[in-house]
């Protein structure tokens, strides 16, 4: 019998939406196809298995096939969809089988960006996307002496401590001028870079990898004319939307490289939204809440939020989805790095003149033991808050969420400074770090300083 809904991909957005519909409308026939032999696992947890914070990769599997069966979901793993016929309302599977659908969802996720450099196919070059990638990397680190991490984003940086703790010499290479360039400004990235250097890592920024060298297996990496010894390479240069199947079907791809969708997650073809064909997750573009420009936001919490709105649309409830800010946090060793909104560099690229203030505070009352330093940078466009960056060993996660709400509500620095806050010596100083930073930013905005 023809499925009512077919999902291509069973990651964070697709599987979550399917779960919601199955629970609310159990009579709905839902089929999900996944190229991956295992679904419903946490990709974000893999660096912490490697660092022995989580006991095994199996612990990352959130749901078993029995759960899918109990919900009435037809989840087909290890099955690739190779074609989509929008007119016939059917998908073609690897092997030639055709499956018709009532409604179709592209939830194809993202794929690792692999730089086009000689040697990427050598043994010892790894990525970290699937569970099998994680297990393969875990085997490789046993006995490894030196590693090069290509890319200064969250996955590579969260994995670096796992290598360092094993006594592996680690070099991190980022072609941009500083680490985490999409989330941090240079004056905040320096705290992260200093922390990693103190752990024993070598940081190379502003240079790209020229080649990966070796006779069948990785032996070294060439960066800026310098040869760096390595018997293990981790490709962590970010991800890109997985849009090839959608592109093949004639669906519009937007300026940021993701599937172009409207506020109801309907895909577009030649600029027109298609009924009964949707997309969600890392493969789509969204609207930035500050600039109004299209962006790709490959973050698990964003995909999960999309899924809730998508499920309502698929059940016939018109609940439009709004612009995003893409709040993010990375945990590098015991350092928490959080951000939301625009950096000053992104402001300037969008034609916004940023006004910013950096503050340094304690995470607890000065006299209470166990506290640590919290670095905060708040950014405004002269009137409202448009960005924030935070770094410390505690107190980051909740404040990023607080600032996300403040930016969505278009709060001014003065309004944020006036927000009531709670206090107890073990968890915060009397004046919250955000309150102080917002007060000082308000003064800067008033004086017109940058």
Image: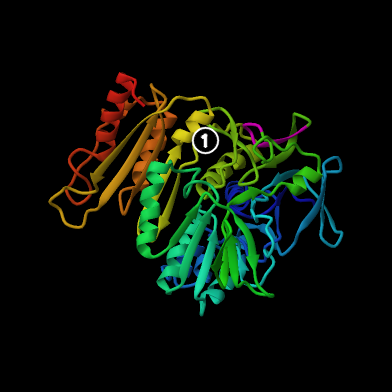
Where in the figure is residue 73, as x and y percent of width and height? 66, 57
Q: Is residue 197 magenta?
A: no
Quadrant of the snapshot with the N terminus: bottom right
Q: What are the residue bounds of the magenta stretch?
A: 262-269
Compared to residue 69, the image places residue 16 above or below, namely: above
Quadrant of the snapshot with the C terminus: top left
Where in the figure is residue 39, as x and y percent of width and height? 62, 61
Colour treatment of the image: rainbow
- The reply to whether residue 417 is visible in this rendering is no
Compared to residue 180, the image places residue 291 above or below, namely: above
Name, please, the residue furthest toward the bottom. 143
Residue displayed at 33% across by 22% down: 445
Where in the figure is residue 412, as x and y percent of width and height? 35, 24
Residue displayed at 87% across by 59% down: 96
Q: Nearer the viewer, residue 420 or 168?
A: 168
Quadrant of the image occupied by residue 41: bottom right
Structural crowding at the residue carrying mark 1, measured as other residues with C-alpha within 10 Å and reported as few (<14), some (14–19) or many (≥20) = many
Q: Is residue 268 magenta?
A: yes
Query: Could you tell me how many numbered marks the image carries?
Result: 1
Residue displayed at 44% across by 53% down: 330
What element does badge 1 sit on? loop
Q: Nearer the viewer, residue 205 or 82?
A: 205
Q: Nearer the viewer, residue 90 or 414?
A: 414
Residue under circle 1?
324
Where in the figure is residue 49, as x and y percent of width and height? 47, 68
């Amino acid at each position: 019998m023809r499925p009512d809904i077919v999902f291509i991909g069973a990651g964070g957005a697709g599987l979550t939406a399917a779960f919601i519909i199955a629970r609310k409308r159990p009579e709905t026939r839902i089929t999900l196809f996944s190229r991956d032999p295992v679904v419903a696992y946490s990709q974000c947890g893999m660096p912490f298995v490697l660092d022995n914070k989580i006991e095994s990769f199996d612990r990352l599997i959130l749901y078993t096939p029995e759960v899918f069966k109990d919900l009435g979901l037809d989840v087909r793993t290890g099955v690739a969809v190779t074609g989509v016929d929008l007119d016939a309302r059917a998908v073609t599977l690897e092997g030639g089988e055709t499956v018709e659908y009532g409604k179709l969802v592209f939830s194809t996720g993202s794929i690792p960006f692999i730089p086009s450099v000689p040697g990427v196919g050598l043994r010892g070059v790894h990525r970290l996307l699937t569970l099998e990638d994680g297990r393969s990397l875990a085997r490789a680190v046993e006995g490894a002496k030196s590693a090069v991490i290509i890319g200064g984003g969250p996955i590579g940086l969260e994995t670096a401590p796992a290598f360092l703790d094993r006594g592996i010499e680690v070099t991190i290479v980022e072609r941009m001028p500083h680490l985490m360039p999409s989330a941090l400004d240079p004056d905040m990235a320096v705290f992260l870079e200093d922390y990693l250097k103190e752990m024993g890592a070598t940081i190379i920024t502003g240079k790209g990898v020229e080649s990966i060298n070796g006779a069948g297996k990785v032996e070294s990496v060439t960066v800026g004319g310098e040869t760096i010894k390595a018997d293990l390479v981790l490709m962590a240069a970010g991800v890109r939307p997985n849009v090839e199947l959608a592109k093949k079907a004639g669906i519009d791809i937007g300026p940021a490289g993701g599937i172009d969708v409207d506020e109801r997650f309907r895909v577009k073809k030649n600029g027109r939204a298609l009924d009964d064909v949707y997309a969600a997750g890392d493969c789509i573009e969204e609207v930035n809440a500050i600039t109004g420009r299209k962006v790709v936001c490959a973050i698990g919490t964003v995909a999960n939020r999309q899924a809730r709105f998508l499920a309502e649309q698929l059940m016939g409830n018109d609940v439009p989805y709004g612009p995003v800010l893409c709040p993010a946090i990375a945990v590098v060793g015991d350092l928490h790095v959080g951000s939301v909104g625009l950096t000053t560099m992104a402001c300037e690229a969008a034609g916004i003149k940023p006004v910013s203030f950096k503050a340094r505070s304690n995470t607890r009352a000065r006299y209470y033991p166990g506290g640590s330093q919290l670095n905060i940078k708040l950014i405004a466009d002269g009137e409202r808050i448009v960005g924030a960056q935070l770094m410390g060993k505690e107190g980051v996660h909740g404040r990023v969420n607080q600032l996300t709400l403040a930016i969505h509500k278009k709060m001014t620095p003065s309004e944020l400074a006036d927000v009531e806050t709670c206090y107890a010596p073990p968890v915060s100083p009397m004046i919250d770090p955000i309150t102080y930073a917002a007060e000082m930013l308000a003064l800067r905005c008033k004086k017109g300083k940058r």
